[in-house]
Image (cartoon, rainbow, N blue to C red):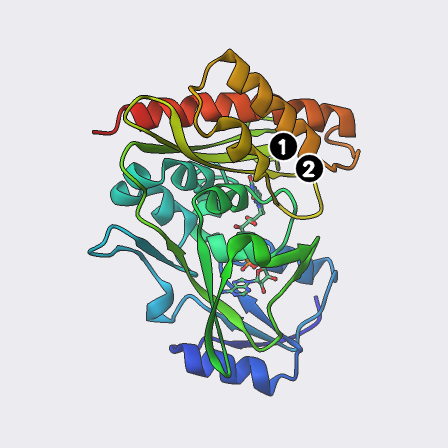
Amino acid sequence: MTPFRYLAPTSIGAAIDALKASGGTAKLLGGGTDLLMALRARRYAASVVVDTKRIPELSGVNVRADGSFRIGAATPCSVVAADPALSAAWPGVAESANLIGSVQVRNRATLAGNLCNASPAADSVPALIAAGAVAVVAGPGGERRLAVEQVTTGPGTTALAPDEMLVAFELPAPAPRSGSAYLRLTPRTEMDIAIVGCGIALTLAADGTIAAARMALGAVAPTALPVPEAAGVLVGRRLDDAALKALDAVARAACRPITDKRGTSAYRIRGAGVLARRAAILAASRAEAQP
Ligand SMILES: Cc1cc2nc3c(=O)[nH]c(=O)nc-3n(C[C@H](O)[C@H](O)[C@H](O)COP(=O)(O)OP(=O)(O)OC[C@H]3O[C@@H](n4cnc5c(N)ncnc54)[C@H](O)[C@@H]3O)c2cc1C
């Protein structure tokens, strides 16, 4: 590993100053569960590593008076997964955080690192997209907000400038009778990344038909993939066999996967349809259980 300076600022301003002063050679550290591996393997070098975990505004899961959520960028996945209010409102996001790595990994790893590492297979990203989450980005000019699906631009690349950092995720309050889910297919049950991941959020109307739907897929394209066609085939219908078949078809049609050692392109495409159906059934059952 190439030597680097380690900084642990205690404010967002100080972190941005450190990024700026490095002239683009600094790296932010959340849990370090991706970053340290990459530095060790010399996939990239950093002159400075800026730890985000000592910045108070970047820690914790907060529910606001209107039922919306703010998840600090440096909050460990184990804290996100265990938050009772978030798990009740956005179970898909909580269960995606709970799938990342092992207990030890989740005690360090963050959702910001999961997103900004920009792996197509990152587990929390499809769930966050399905929830309509927004990434709050801070930089020298202040804050800006990006839909989560706008943050990654390709494998390993993001829309953030070198002197910007993600400070939080904002999630809306779910509408009444809403449910969400995240499911993934992996070669092993633990400690492996997804061959396919599917996050979905559904809202039911009083008559049991679907009033709103958001779905995103992971590991089937260079970035996590929103599938707006899911709403087109679900809204206004009951989640019956015909609707599930249509959902399976739009999920498969959206995929642009690679073939690698974990799975062939054809297997990923087939898996995307199956996961979409299963995740929709789970999300609908959660929505039905809401008052
Ligand atoms: C054993 C093991 C198992 C794993 N299993 C899974 C799995 O099942 N599913 C999965 O999705 N991933 C898995 N991972 C990958 C990794 O744990 C996750 O991607 C994790 O969420 C990364 O978070 P982190 O906080 O550790 O990121 P870091 O390693 O700290 O950072 C990752 C990247 O994000 C950048 N970054 C960090 N914080 C910010 C910020 N606030 N603003 C902007 N950029 C930032 C860093 O500079 C770096 O480029 C696994 C890793 C290991 C080692």
> What residue sits right under mark 1 in the picture?
196
Q: CA distance from mark 2 to mark 1?
A: 6 Å
Q: Position of residue 202 (x, y in %)?
A: 41, 33
Nearest to N terminus: mark 2 or mark 1 = 1
Is residue 259 found left or right of 9 in the rendered image? right
- In this view of the protein, can residue 110 be seen by the observer? no
Of 174 and 5, nearer the camera is 174
On the rendered image, what quadrant is the N terminus found in?
Answer: bottom right
> What residue sits right under mark 2 in the picture?
220
Q: Residue at x 34, y 69 (%)?
A: 57
Q: Position of residue 196 (x, y in %)?
A: 63, 32
Circles 2 and 1: CB distance less than 8 Å? Answer: yes
Q: Position of residue 92 (x, y in %)?
A: 42, 36
Identify the amino acid type marked 1: Val
Is residue 205 found left or right of 159 in the rendered image? left
Q: Tell me: residue 262, above or below residue 21.
A: above
Q: Secondary structure at mark 2?
A: loop
**Disc sitting over residue 78 in the figure:** none
Of 239 and 46, nearer the camera is 239
* Dot 1 crowding, Cα within 10 Å, few <14, some 14–19, many 20+: many
Q: Tell me: residue 208, above or below residue 196.
A: above
Of 181 and 102, nearer the camera is 181
